[in-house]
Amino acid sequence: MSSAISLSRIEKWFGAGTEAVHALAPTDLAVAEGEFVVLLGPSGCGKTTLLRMIGGLLEPTRGALKVEDKELWSHGVRQGQALSELGMVFQDANLFPWLSIEDNIALPLELKGVGTAERRAKARELTKLVGISGFEKRWPRELSGGMRQRAAIARALSYNPKILLMDEPFGALDAMTRDTMNLELQRIWMETRKTIVLVTHSISEAVFLADRIVLLSPRPGRIDTIIDVPMPRPRSLDVQAGEDFQEIAKMLRHRLAEIS
């Protein structure tokens, strides 16, 4: 299986001289096409730094980073071909309050010069995919937090990137809404088969969503353990009470306690 994302000896330092902070030690990682990988770890372990480097928001200090077999950085410049394969979702939906939900979703297409009719048709298609059909003309303030995150996911998918990067997308939601969004994200992933890399602090969220969990340890951030999650899909919330789920969660909890 080919790699959607390939990291070779990726490393990140912030600052210089005696004040320099080693945020991420040299790291190797390959994410396969269509795989769902979760980055898990304590605060300060470099998981968001790693995700932002994959997303082209931070330049690695050293190492090589390829997206769909294309170099993401060349001589300090982000490469558009690789960047176009990436969509990103943050903890805050970051919707523009003066735009309707439909126009927020279609904004990346407008910036790419796509015509009005085509981009609105795409926005309507995506509202159906993420479960907010009928809310296209609403303002962001009229939607719940979970619905705004659905719109943010739709916007990230608007230009059909092959890879979706998600930085604690459900971290600000209440527990019940978070469970619902985990089910919805699994459904969206199974329908689109995008490659997804998601950052979370939640062990249960990681085990529920992932094909593989990459556990990072802090100071400096580095990959500690990679765990396969072989449970069949689709997974219902009831899977969390199962022996396989509990065994993986227990292993992660113990290891997190040791490295934190």
Image (cartoon, helix red, strand yellow):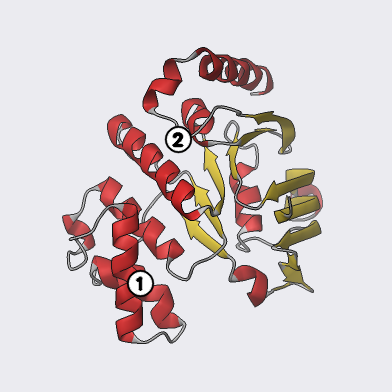
Q: Is residue 182 left or right of residue 147?
A: right
What residue type is disc 2 on?
Pro
Residue 205 spot, x, y in % from top left: 47, 31
Identified by mark 1, the residue type is Lys
Whole-percent x and y of residue 126? 34, 63
Q: Where does the C terminus fall, quadrant-wise? A: top right
Comes first in the chain, label 1 or label 2: 1
- SS at mark 1? helix
Query: Label 2: which residue?
Result: 234
Q: Could you tell me how many numbered marks the image carries?
A: 2
- The residue that label 1 is drawn on is 122
Pointers 1 and 2 in contact (C-beta within 8 Å): no
Which label sits in the foreground, 1 or 2?
A: 2
Q: Which residue: 74% across, 48% down?
A: 30
Q: Quadrant of residue 113?
A: bottom left
Q: Residues within 10 Å of mark 2 (few under 14, many from 20)?
A: few
- Can residue 95 be seen at all in this image of the molecule? no
Give the percent coordinates (x, y) of residue 154.
Answer: 38, 60
